[in-house]
Amino acid sequence: MLTDSLTNFRVTLASRPVGEPTEANFRIDRRPVPEIAEGEILLQVLYLSLDPYMRGRMDAAKSYAAPVAIGDVMEGGTVARILKSRNRSYTPGEIVLSHSGWQSYAVANGDGLRKLNPESAPISTALGVLGMPGFTAYAGLRNIGKPMAGETVVVAAASGAVGSAVGQIAKINGARAVGIAGGKEKCTFVLDELGFDAVIDHTKADFADALAASCSNGIDVYFENVGGPIWDAVFPLLNDFARVPVCGLIAHYNGEVSARPDRLTDVMRTILRKSLTIRGFIQREFADQRPEFYQEASKWIAEGRLKYREDIVDGLENAPRAFIGLLKGRNFGKLIVRVSE
Amino acid sequence: MLTDSLTNFRVTLASRPVGEPTEANFRIDRRPVPEIAEGEILLQVLYLSLDPYMRGRMDAAKSYAAPVAIGDVMEGGTVARILKSRNRSYTPGEIVLSHSGWQSYAVANGDGLRKLNPESAPISTALGVLGMPGFTAYAGLRNIGKPMAGETVVVAAASGAVGSAVGQIAKINGARAVGIAGGKEKCTFVLDELGFDAVIDHTKADFADALAASCSNGIDVYFENVGGPIWDAVFPLLNDFARVPVCGLIAHYNGEVSARPDRLTDVMRTILRKSLTIRGFIQREFADQRPEFYQEASKWIAEGRLKYREDIVDGLENAPRAFIGLLKGRNFGKLIVRVSE
């Protein structure tokens, strides 16, 4: 059998991180690829998506999803090729979006897969601009942020998978997009390539002042995907009736406890005084809007109104280091691991 | 002229409070009632509403409304009788809802008044269950809380003007209403008279445990009108997708700064993890729903499904002390000052 000669290269969770994850929290191993049973398919993973939410899965605490167990393969979205099929719905050679995790092969029963058409868009985009991150931007703006023409929308990690889509979709809605990014190279990309109206470099000492100057009419939508010091600079600039979709808090994922005096009382008073909306969400809450998203976003990409950048790392053995860098903002664009050719 | 012999009894803001207001922050004076000009009316104030939001008006900081200036009459909703009219829209003897403030007479041009029908409901209810507090409960639930059948709705100050309506309207929507109140007398009233499903006494040492036991399926809607330690007990019990309309934070109105470690990071993480909605609001944002509210609430009152309790204090000279007591939860029901018979 073909599969007898295949080895599944896996990255498992070796231990739970205390604070920032290190490479020691991961273990790389090799296992034989199992035989598939009737109704099953064998997937060869081509691309693995690395996303900030995975940090939450490494903790024991229940988040909106169960944690990864020690010794289990790390979770993650993947693009894979059907290698073998004993399931009539799938034919070898087809490309699917799957959730196969950090490994090179996976056995699946076909549930929850989405077939991709390699001719309509590069298949890696199913992990980024046409995948979960892009849909996070779309759903958060459509259902919570609701930017109106002339309003100011601010997003951090603006060169990243979610942030880049947030700003561009805000502009498609007629709003003004202000991005926050780290370093000159990313800022130039956000302004010149993505076409944001303004970009602020959060690594500069005058960051808060520059943001305020750039948002002279205040902020109507703050798409929260980072938390931390950026929140502190954004919060005083929020306008009455501002909306804050919260899809991520990367600055807090490593569990630092703030030694500062309590900010909650002031934040709650401001929520009241300014009639603010703060709303956490996970994109799958709005899953019924995905077909519309694929259609609209594909059109925007074709029209050149929704651009994206991928940061592709070669080889699954480099996934832990790339993921650790992601949490520090070291990637530049949607971070993807090329697992197989 | 009749008005020549009338004296306007006024309560003005003498100084801005530092922390809790005291009677020294108010000044009582007497002024002649001015003559009315063409198009104007003279109002005799019958009832003055005392509400927690007034504490905010005593501070210099801009809230959602301008502060009361030092020396100005304290702001407030009132029920008044038309005493004289040089405005064809008003006839002496008519009763109106006005915003005449803490004084016994006021000259108005007729704008922003609402005529009341004394035969359809006691006129004082226009300040409570059929007025701003009742509408705050109605609009906050209808637009933000959206309680569904079988869900658990929690509200503090449950014997008060807003809280009592929140619980009863939640029950009309098929939800389970859990009230929080201070002391045995109020708790008995909330349970036995208002018909809440459960009530918890926040003055007891086991308050947080009792609340948790009473909300064994978690909390789906927390109608926030107090803040402070009650928030800390409620927050861990919020369910995924819980909604928190924020209409008041009476525990924070006196501006205490918390010396505790920062809670904001944990709250934001929980907002994300549980897909919570936190939304500040002022009832006037939903002003277009008032006609429907008057109609529905009047029907509920007639059917005995929406009960209310008024705490009526006689004499405007007692307004400052009554207001100070309101901020400490000393009232029992909607606090109203009877200014004239």
Image (cartoon, coloured by chain):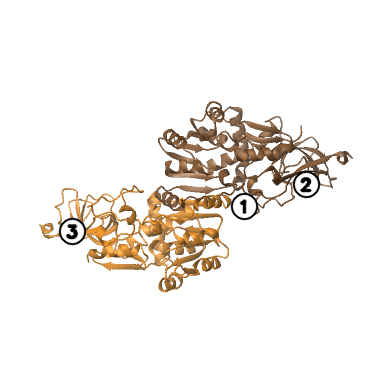
Chain colours: A orange, B brown
> Does residue A148 appear anywhere in the picture?
no
Residue corresponding to mark 3? A29
The reply, left or right, for residue A110 in relation to residue B115 is left
Mark carried by residue B63: 1
Secondary structure beneath disc 2? Answer: loop
Q: Amino acid at mark 3?
A: Asp
The reply, left or right, for residue B106 in relation to residue B198 is right
- Is the C terminus of chain B in the top left, top right, bottom left or bottom right quadrant? top right
Measured along the vertical axis of the image, is residue B208 above or below residue B56? above
Question: The numbered mark 2 sits on a residue in which chain?
Answer: B
- Is the N terminus of chain B in the top left, top right, bottom left or bottom right quadrant? top right
Q: Residue furthest top?
A: B192
The reply, left or right, for residue B81 in relation to residue A9 is right
Measured along the vertical axis of the image, is residue A206 above or below residue B30? below
**Mark 2, other Cα within 10 Å: few <14 / some 14–19 / many ≥20:** some
Q: Nearer the viewer, residue A10 or B27?
A: B27
Q: Nearer the viewer, residue A187 or A202?
A: A202
Residue corresponding to mark 2? B109
> Does residue B143 appear anywhere in the picture?
yes
